[in-house]
Amino acid sequence: MLDLEEAVMGIIVNAGQSRSLCFEALRQAREGQFAQATALLAEATEAGKAAHAVQTKLIEADEGEGKTKMTLVMVHAQDHLMTSILCRELASELVEVYRRQAR
């Protein structure tokens, strides 16, 4: 059985890391450092995958039957995951905009 507190922290930490890497990628792109920005986005993707893997384990453990206790911190973790996914998608697009402007 998956420890709920550990799972929640796994989502929050990895999603937060993904979001931070996205903003660093944007800073690098703004400075014209596109290789670094691309590498940071790749790292952000991996952190996001780690957060999503934890979420998937929780979903599997729940089996659609409400077995997983829903708490405010769980909702908070889900919020972090969703905003990090959006951040990564938007950052990827903005890095491309910076890249095109630099040509």
Image (cartoon, rainbow, N blue to C red):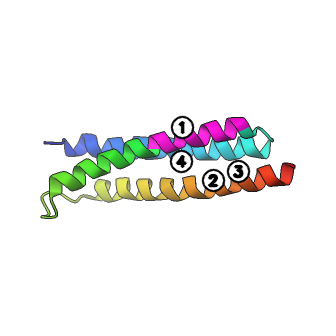
- Residue beneath the point at 24% across and 48% down: 57
Residue tagged 3: 95
Residue tagged 2: 91
List x then y, in percent, for residue 96.
72, 53
**Magenta stretch encompasses residue 33:** no
* Amino acid identity at mark 2: Ala
Q: Are marks 2 and 1 in contact (CB under 8 Å)?
A: no
Which numbered disc covers residue 19? Answer: 4
1 and 45: which one is in front? 45
Separation (CA) of disc 4 from disc 3: 14 Å
Neighbours of disc 1 within 10 Å: few (<14), some (14-19), many (20+): some
56 and 14: which one is in front? 56
**Is 9 displayed left or right of 17 in the figure?**
left
Q: Earlier in the sequence, mark 1 or mark 4?
A: 4
Q: Which residues are magenta?
A: 35-47
List x then y, in percent, for residue 1.
13, 42
Residue 67 visible in the picture: yes
Residue 68 visible in the picture: no
Q: SS at mark 1?
A: helix
Q: Are marks 4 and 3 in contact (CB under 8 Å)?
A: no
Query: What secondary structure do most residues of the magenta stretch adopt?
Result: helix
Residue tagged 1: 43
* Amino acid identity at mark 4: Arg
